[in-house]
Amino acid sequence: MARMHTRRKGQAGSTKPYRTEPVKWSNTNKDEIEKTILQLATQGKSSSEIGMSLRDRYGVPDVTLVTGKKIVTILKENKQASGIPEDIHNLIVKVLDLKKHIDKNPKDVHNKRSLNNMVSKIRRLEKYYHREGVLPDDWKFSTQKAEMLISR
């Protein structure tokens, strides 16, 4: 499949091995893993950071195999999930940084284009999450509101 904003082909990525049960050497205590997820979420870590620390520190290569739920689902059940999805949040942070750069350097045409590409990615994700019911229908991205969204 080709890349979205260039004419080149994409790189092949690695895939996780297909497993139906957790590995024997891993931590399989379901209650302990859920407590650790909630504890890491109260420290302000995102779901991907929680997954990496569970993998690296606690010996849990795949939370879904052990608990039967994804990390985001566990956070939603305990009302600790953030209001907007993590991928949109990360893109908004990048857009804000790039906006500051463009305000200082108005002739930087290359980064103006990359800013437009990022905003279009956010808008496509916004349509997807509206369709799936993750975001409310009145949620709309704008660069003016973006700083308020991130500061919360």
Image (cartoon, grey):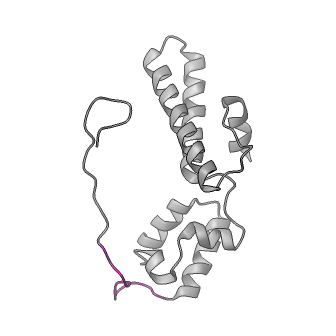
Residue 24 in the image: above or below residue 2: below
Q: Residue at x 74, y 39 (%)?
A: 148
**Residue 31 in the image, given as x and y percentages of width and height:** 58, 87
For residue 72, side relative to residue 150 (left or right):
left
Is residue 21 shown in magenta? yes
- Would residue 58 be visible to someone looking at this image? no
**Residue 83 in the image, given as x and y percentages of width and height:** 69, 54
Q: Residue at x 29, y 29 (%)?
A: 7
Q: What secondary structure is the magenta-colored segment mainly?
A: loop
Q: State the image quarter where residue 126 is shown.
A: top right
For residue 53, side relative to residue 134 (left or right):
left
Residue 95 in the image: above or below residue 60: above
For residue 65, side relative to residue 140 (left or right):
left
For residue 78, side relative to residue 115 (left or right):
right
**Split into 4 quadrants, where in the image is the N terminus?**
top left
- Would residue 35 be visible to someone looking at this image? yes
Q: Nearer the viewer, residue 91 or 139?
A: 139
**Residue 122 in the image, given as x and y percentages of width and height:** 56, 39
Q: Which residues are magenta?
A: 18-28
Is residue 12 shown in magenta? no
